Amino acid sequence: MSKRKILMSLATMCMLSTAAMAQGPKAGGVVNAVIQPEPPSLMIGLVQNGPTQMVAGNIYEGLLRYSPKLDPLPGLAESWSVSEDGKVYTFKLLKGVTWHDGKPFTSADVLFSIEFLKQTHARARGNLVQLDKVEAPDESTVVFTLKQPFGPFIGIFEVGSLPMIPKHIYEGTDFKTNPANNTPVGTGPFMFKEWQKGSFIRLVKNPNYHVKGKPNIDEIYWHVIPDAAARSVAYETGKVDVLPGGSVENFDVPRLSKLKNTCVTGAGWEFFSPHSWLWLNNRSGPTANKKFRQALMFAIDRNMAKDVVWNGLGKVATGPSGSSIKYYTSAVPKYDYDPAKAKALLKEAGYNGEKVRMLPLPYGETWQRWAEMVRQNLQDVGINVEMIATDVPGWNQKVSEWDYDIAFTYLYQYGDPALGVGRNYVSSQIAKGSPFNNVEGYSNPEIDRLFADGAVAFPDSAREEIYAKAQKILVEDVPVAWMLELQFPTITRCSVKNLITTGIGVNDGFRDAWIEK
Amino acid sequence: MKQASRVLLRNPGGMIGIAILVIAVAVALFGPLLFPTSPWRMVQRPFLPPFTLSGFPLGTDALGRDVMAGIIYGARVSLLVGLISTLASLAVGIPLGATAGYFGGKVDDALMRFTEFFQTVPSFALAIVLVAIMQPSIVSIVAAIAIVSWPPVARLVRGEVLSLRTREYVQAAVVTGQTNWWIIWREILPNALSPVIVLASLMVATAILLESSLSFLGLGDPNLMSWGYMVGAGRTVIRQAWWITVFPGIAILVSVLALNLIGEGLNDALNPRLAKGGR
Amino acid sequence: MISFIAQRIAKAIIVLLALVVLNFFLIRMAPGDPAVVMAGEAGAGDQLFIAQLREKFGLDQPLPVQLFLYVKGILSLDLGFSFRQQMPVSKLILDRLPATLLLTGTAFAISLAFGILFGALAARFAGTWADTAITIAALIFYATPLFWVALMAILLFSVTMDWLPSFGYETVGAGYTGLPHVLDVAAHLILPATTIGLFFMATYARMTRASMLEVNRLDFVKTARAKGLSDTVIQRRHVLRNALLPVVTLAGLQAGTLVGGAVLTETVFAWPGIGRLMYEALLQRDYNLLLGVFVVCSAMVLAFNLITDLVYRSVDPRIEFAS
């Protein structure tokens, strides 16, 4: 080959490899994110607050991860199988995984975690109610045997729902006061390094992470900035690169999206699928009347709320299930914005101007504006609304003690109606003291039966039929007034790539993220 | 008194203050007649900039509500909150201070310990806790402001009464057998009032600022449109809609400034030596 | 003298204890408790969960028992345990106290320095338009809501001009030590301290002005003038020093409030101080932490009141010593 040709091919090879390098993940870099509010603790087995899950989801791991479509992906389990009758789940664990302190991760840890979480984790307790026994035939195999087939079972292994806890640190100790709670030890891509309360949390790369080549990022700083406007400024001045969903007020999102090198996405919440509605006190007051509740649904302009308060993000909810939740159906009665119909229904219900107490969610300006908007909608059809102000604990108290007529809320749905939807409509979940169960006091034996059957029906098609029926009945009865399927946009620098790849987004997304220089 | 008011009228700062306050009160009383639509109603598109559409000189907010209407109705709320909480503080502080100053001894000691007790907790912190306990409403805000504001009144009145107690006309009243309460009410308090009036004007100003701070932190009454509430509501959109925070902020600034100027003017008028300067 | 101090300290301790008891009950009157808050943040909870939390937080014991345990702890200087944050309250407070003291101390110095300066100037030109102008300028800073000034300051100096950082105590992750660290913290300190400082300047300006005018009328000043001393010398050597006495007294009394006074500023600037800690503790119904902050703030106020009183009495011989 002539010299020129050799040089040319060398040059071409250099160019091609550079191009290849430019496309592949780069190692190194520090990411600055915000966390709001500051989590009370990072020990995800004991504390399940949103912020805790967001940070600690990168420290701990679950047996499975979930794609944006909520299909299970390998986590600490590399493969799994379900028996024909749907009662036995066998997981094969990854080999050679170590905890951050070097000790090996084995099936004994899985067994211990189940026992630990049954004592400390309310949601896990609920999810494991069909569990008959769990066994570990060898170091890397775990077998769950259920009392009855439970369709949602494959969906409960997310890191926040069922995190793996190190047995060698917690066995035989008082979990709540174990000093190790201040230095969380997991198997995840990032290790806990430092926490200056009130300022920041620092995570560093796990050099012995079981996925070779990951994580790409060296360090994550989670900054604590209590004021929403200040968080926006921090992003604008380049001090912060990632604003997870809910960090800034919605009104600021359009402006921030237009900044240089800024990418916005609504993805990463598919697993939680936040669903907002108004609790309507089914027990007392005007809201105890079904016609009144239906009138409310017609009186509220949800499309305008979506456009004005939520900047066009999200979807109008059609019923108790979000559209990304399994077995969602839109074949239900419709409640379009229709003030005339609302007025007519109010008359039928015999409403005569009694005062109706409305409780907004004390989570910031967006919710306050939304409450004001709904108040106007209701006043326009002749309902006498009084807005009650509370702070967060006051809100929790009032709702848990059923001291309200209408109360804003939003809850997570966790992918499956048996995991996140049923709890708000079945009679067994009527109990004072919690703002997450059947707070409205709706009691319908048929719904109870449908949800009970739906959880354990087998196969999937049977569940679909049952839930379709349940949704139709609920939408007809309007135990609560469903508002919007919420979207919490995550704002990042475009140079932070591949951050949101799973159904829980930022919570475990730093594993696969990388920074383009 | 006549001489005092003459001095006050010559004081430029005080005059400006009075003029502004008169305007503010006029707006509070008559504004709603000219702007009958409730400030809560969504009347235009959101984030309308000021001076772009006739009829909406100050623009609209995040929900398309008229900022001008908000300022007008807010005048009522802010001024009322300031006035009522100050009156409540005076109602507690004056009797307490007068009793302590007049009777002295153990009564004074006990009352002053009680006052000091209230002054040791940082006042804003205590106000926040009180509002949190009673949960935010106009009543709880006024009560909280009143509760943290009365100690200086008591101290001031006590000091004045202490010094006035030894005056001759008071001694004369004692000798002629007047009852203690009559003496306090008719002889002492009227003469002790001048510094109290000065203090009161400053307290109204502080109350307005306190209310706006509480609203900023999210502890305001959601049924009443006050200036503090508007600033708090607009602060998250301050970058794209500066007018939502700036105009109510100016309203607060101007009212508080006016009250302070009046206070200064009153102080100079009622303490004539100081007004003339040192030469 | 000693017995006077001892008496005052004893009285202060009684006041402090009374405050503890009062606040202990006051805080619990707010609706909700820390267990409900934690459950709320977890997005899920059942009876068992909340019961466990209540037990962990020591809430299941009868109220008098809780009070007794708490007071016992206070007497041995133990401020209790924050169950929510899983750390002793004293550690949480001590971690944040220096930041607050730095912030409010600097703000205090700024307000005192500029207040005295402007007050003296206003007294010098008393009765003229300059006097009114200075007074109004100082008052404008006093009349503007603190949080609004803070936001405007951030907009101007951080976002538009990018001269100063907008949040935090220092640049996180930069690992500065020594002089660069001091400069870094100083850069973060300027905006919040100046915001507060300008606000309180008016009080000192007003007081200095009034005091200086008062002193200027006194006989010894007339004597000095008759002797032919220049005006500047008179103001500086004779008038100012005497006029400052009430200002310093006021400053001493206000110094006690340094610890608790910065909630708003700390929130907007994300300054990791006590004010913010207290506000968050309130919202989380973290009773022990909230009470602990109150105790510390009140103790500081009482201490400074006593110190100021002593200084005042020793400096001004006209004041009687015996109470």
Image: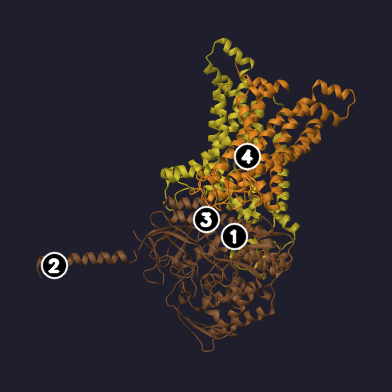
Q: Counting residues from the N terminus, which is met first, the one under dot 3 or under dot 2?
A: 2
Q: Which mark is in front, 3 or 4?
A: 3
Q: Nearer the viewer, residue A130 or A61?
A: A130
Chain for disc number 3: A
Q: Could you tell me how far apart the alpha carbons at marks 2 and 1 are, in whole angstroms?
A: 67 Å
Q: Position of residue A177 (x, y in %)?
A: 60, 64
Q: Nearer the viewer, mark 1 or mark 3?
A: 3
Q: In the rendering, what colour is chain B?
A: orange
Q: Mark 2 sits on what residue?
A: A6
x then y, percent, for residue A330: 55, 75
Say if mark 1 contacts mark 4, CB within 8 Å: no
| Residue beneath disc 1 | C86
The shade of chain A is brown
State the residue position of label 3: A249
Number of residues whose C-alpha sits closer than 10 Å to that of mark 1, classed few (under 14), some (14–19) or many (20 or more): some
Q: CA distance from mark 1 to mark 3?
A: 30 Å
| Dots 3, 4 in contact, CB < 8 A | no
Q: For the residue marked with disc 4, what is the amino acid?
A: Gly
> Which quadrant of the figure contains the C terminus of chain A?
bottom left
The image shows residue A234 at horizontal and vertical percentages of 46, 51
> How many angstroms separate mark 3 from mark 4 (CA)?
37 Å
Chain letter of mark 2 equals A
Q: Is residue A57 above or below residue B177?
A: below
Q: Which residue is mark 4?
A: C256
Kindly report the distance in space between the C-alpha atoms of the residues bearing marks 1 and 4: 29 Å
